[in-house]
Amino acid sequence: MNRKKITEKFALDAILYIIIIYIIGFLTFSAQAQVIQEPAKKEVRKLKKGLHKENIFDKVYKDILKYGTFYVAGEVSNPYQKQSIDYVVRTNPSGNLYDVPVVQDATEYHEFDYRYGFGIRRIARFDYENKEKAYYDGTEKNVALSSPTAAFSGFEYLFHWEKERERGEVFENHRYFLRHTGKNHIVKVESRAEGNVGFQYNSAEVRGRLPIGKKFSISAGVIARTHDQAFGYNPVEIWLNETDEDGYALNPWYTLGFEYGYDDIYYNQTDQLGNEISDWYWIDEDGTIVAHTDLEFRETVFADLMNRYNREQWDLLDAFAEVAPIVGADWYSYTDKAWVHAYANYILPYHKYFKGDEDFSYLNRNNWGLGGLIQDSELEQWDDYQFGLILGWNITSKLGIFVEGEYTKFWDAEIFKSTIGLNIEL
Amino acid sequence: MRLCILILFLIPTLTFAQSYKDGIVVVQYSADFVKANEIDISKLEGADLLRLAMSEHPKIFEKEEIKFLPTVCLYHNRKLILKVESDISLKLPEGSIDKIQKHINKIVKSKF
């Protein structure tokens, strides 16, 4: 079974489980042996909120700013430090290779790590989530940022920017998130960048929402997303595999070195046994020897050049943006004794690119061969999905179990995390 | 393995009962003969609002131990947070709305 089939099977199983939960949830709704008769929907007079006259500033405060928190935060910590210390030997300052060498500490020491940033947030936590700290500093992770529906109706937002230094490298990160959840709609815009992993993602979605009872809702709409990567396109592989009519390589591997200013110089020598040895040694633009043989060059400098070439070619491409239909479902039930939050998002295989060169898009991920894009190849649609489950059950006052997990498959990226556990209070 | 996962899903689900008291809910327990003494809970924000009439839901009144009419209760995830009862004149105390709103705000604030 190949990877695609395994993924599809896994997704189908997961969807099946979620459907079973929902069906059982519905069945229990009518099958519960309630001591009292619950008020039927039509019997209950649900009061409509009256229209109150209030000024615009009060309304803006109430709808947008109330419960929001502005924060500025910074932290400093020890840098990553290897447990062992590395040493190298240097030639004696006399210049004689056979004099006693100098032993030097070659361990890489980094300056301290830091992170500072600021933001404003108004993200409601679900009842099962605790506030991680007594304050906000921008490191919080909330389920509300990934589940289709929210723990609060109205505007929720997070605008966070930060700069950090990690192992001596400085990065900028941001997360901008804005969502408005109503009884019958979800509108969400998000932009995220993580400099240290080169992650950049933007999305916007609009969905109609249909609550079914108080705990369950389904939604459907459209989502626009961006991605930077040209999946399946490997420029250096194509470049190396270009051949002439006779099948000879047009771009022998070593010519990539010439492209980046390196040069090879032929030499031959005879060893003390009289054997003749010949090869090419490589120099950089300054004339410094970087490799003593072709093999050494290919295993060291050339490997970096390949990646550099690929990065440069990928950078020539614009970012991609596509739009597709999305459906989602969300089940949320909470009491102090037990809680379940299950959610799923499914992006249907009807993707339409509106930005970026479609030849290099994910629709052509399997259509690139050694000679480039295969002629007359068909565009291939795909499914993306995300689902999560948070479940807790305090079986007794001393015993509780919990399960938490989220799985996301977007393009070629699969991200998952899960936790399962048991708590026994002694 | 599949069975284990299914059981994990099912057990808590089966223990749940759908309830009108899920979330933040304000219920005005009343009866037609004291309708004039009800307070206008539609002014409250941040909660689901319900009016239950004694003639239609006598068992609920019994279960919730409603002894005075009207009575307004604030629930959060089925837990009773506040119970405001009318006095001998069948009127709810003055400032009841503000008092309930204050408690609702407190609950909503705790989510952020």
Image (cartoon, coloured by chain):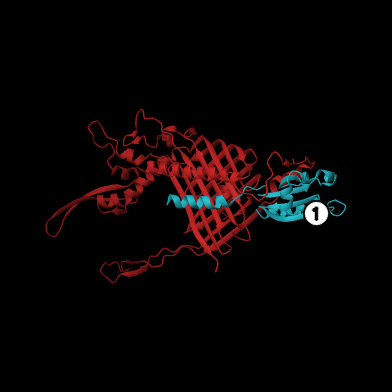
Q: Colour of chain A?
A: red
Image colour for chain B is cyan
Q: Numbered disc 1: what chain?
A: B
Q: Quadrant of residue A372?
A: top left
Local crowd size for mark 1, using a 10 Å CA cut-off: few (<14), some (14–19), many (≥20): many
Would you name the residue on which mark 1 appears?
A: B85
- Amino acid at dot 1: Glu
Is residue A414 shown to the viewer in this render? Answer: yes
Q: In terms of secondary structure, where does tag 1 sit?
A: strand
- Residue appearing at x 42%, y 39% in the figure: A230
Residue A366, located in which quarter of the rendered image?
top left
Say which of A352 and A182 sits in front. A182
Could you tell me residue A178's position as x and y percent?
61, 44
Q: Could you say where residue A392 lies in the image, as x and y percent from the top left? A: 55, 55
* Position of the N terminus of chain A by quadrant: top left
Quadrant the C terminus of chain A occupies = bottom right
